[in-house]
Image (cartoon, rainbow, N blue to C red):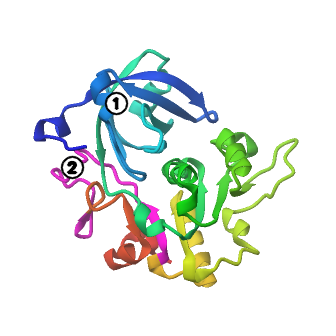
Amino acid sequence: MIQTITDIYLPRQAKVEQIVVENSQISTFVLAFSDQQFNEAFRYQPGQFMMVSMPHCGEAPISISSTPTRPGTIHLSVRRAGHLTAAMHELKPGDTIGLRGPFGRPFPMEQLRNQDLLFVAGGIGLAPLRAVINACLDQRERFGSLTVLYGSRTPSDIAFQADHAQWRQQGVTCRLTVDAAEAGWDGPVGLVTGLLDGLTPELNRSIALICGPPLMFRAVLNRLSAMGFSDEQVLTTMERHMKCGVGVCRHCHMDGKLACVDGPVFSLAELRHLKIMELAD
């Protein structure tokens, strides 16, 4: 979709069609633009984000967690973390919010074709990867095997449970772990890196996509390197507090790059070149 200069600064009204409660802190908002013609023409790519606004609550970037292969609505999975996101968690179906976008460099879906894909996520980090996973499943013949490793604090905190069940039915290998077990949990307990044990990917045709909190991020990078993944075979999304989303304010500056336009998707090779703090051992 081609946007004019006016469009990129002007939020469009979108209505909450449905709210899926993922856990006590994360909900997925299913949205449709109030302008039906615009809604039907709206397009985006996995890995891009929207700038979300509400009156008197400001504006913030939120990753798109739905897939462009299923047009008509857009999903934003939101963790309660601040003033705006707390206000969003008070929304009800029929309420409206403001959206600008889509913005950012997406995941290179053509580069992923014919590759075995390993997704490693923690908490809300599965949201942007969810868009890629579902896009791959909707075009299954274009991609190799799909493996999802996901960690959360407790079983009650596991987000996207309906997706995990559906992905398994569609042949995706899904492995879950928690930091602390609860009654009835008989799965693994420990760091998400433990789920990498026993995996023997074909490195000549594999790409890893990771997203999660910094400590998990660094630990997973070390394990992937030990397994033989090159920096070019690892993709991730970088979170920065973006103000404009379009590269004007430079608030999301990263050692010569801007997260909003040069990212948020980067290869590990690109991040090492930037020498950013998240990659420090």
Q: Is residue 250 shown left or right of residue 148?
A: left
Q: Residue beneath label 1, please?
A: 40
Question: Foreground: 264 or 201?
Answer: 201
Question: Foreground: 37 or 33?
Answer: 37
**Considering only vertical position in the picture, is 67 above or below 87?**
below
Mark 1 falls on what kind of element? Answer: helix
Magenta region includes residue 7? no
Pointer 2 local density, CA inside 10 Å: few below 14, some 14–19, many at least 20 = many
Q: Is residue 241 shown left or right of residue 69?
A: left
Q: What x and y, as percent, mark residue 114?
A: 53, 69
Please report the bounds of the magenta region as a residue range: 233-257
Residue type at the position of mark 2 = Val
Residue 167 showing in the rendered view: yes
**Considering only vertical position in the picture, is 167 above or below 214?**
above
Image quarter (top left, top right, bottom left or bottom right) of the N terminus = top left
Q: Is residue 90 shown left or right of residue 144?
A: left
Q: Residue at x 82, y 54 (%)?
A: 187
